[in-house]
Amino acid sequence: MARLEREGKVTARLAASRSGPARKYYRPTAAGYRALAESAAMWQALTDAVSPVLCQPVPAEPAPPNEER
């Protein structure tokens, strides 16, 4: 969270607590929302590429070795 705060992607505020030290609350900034949207799009692209491979049925037995070299 400290890194995100330094990068300007979140803001933080301290609030008094009745039991113990003050609590720190974070809120995303406009830059933080943009970074989140970009990361979500990149993650979606990755899952779109990997899912077809992972969704193929697993063969009951392994394929025989390829003798051609």
Image: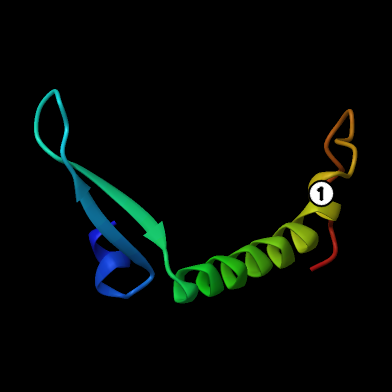
Front one among 62 and 64 = 62
Q: Position of residue 3 (x, y in %)?
A: 26, 65
> As drawn, is 45 to the left or to the right of 40?
right
Q: Quadrant of the C terminus?
A: bottom right
Q: Amino acid at mark 1?
A: Pro
Q: Quadrant of the N terminus?
A: bottom left
> As drawn, is 39 to the left or to the right of 66?
left
The answer to whether 29 is drawn above or below residue 58 in the figure is: below
> As drawn, is 63 to the left or to the right of 39?
right
Q: Residue at x 31, y 75 (%)?
A: 7
Q: Residue at x 15, y 26 (%)?
A: 18
> As drawn, is 44 to the left or to the right of 68?
left
User: Is disc 1 surrounded by few (<14), some (14 to 19) or many (20+) residues within 10 Å?
Assistant: few
The coloring applied to the image is rainbow
The answer to whether 10 is drawn above or below residue 64 in the figure is: below
> Can you identify the residue that label 1 sits on?
65
Q: Position of residue 17 (x, y in %)?
A: 17, 32
Q: Quadrant of residue 57?
A: top right
Q: Quadrant of residue 41?
A: bottom right
Numbered circles on residues, count: 1
Front one among 20 and 69 = 20
From this viewpoint, which residue is outermost toward the top?
19
Q: Residue at x 15, y 39 (%)?
A: 16
Secondary element type, mark 1: loop
Q: Quadrant of residue 22?
A: top left
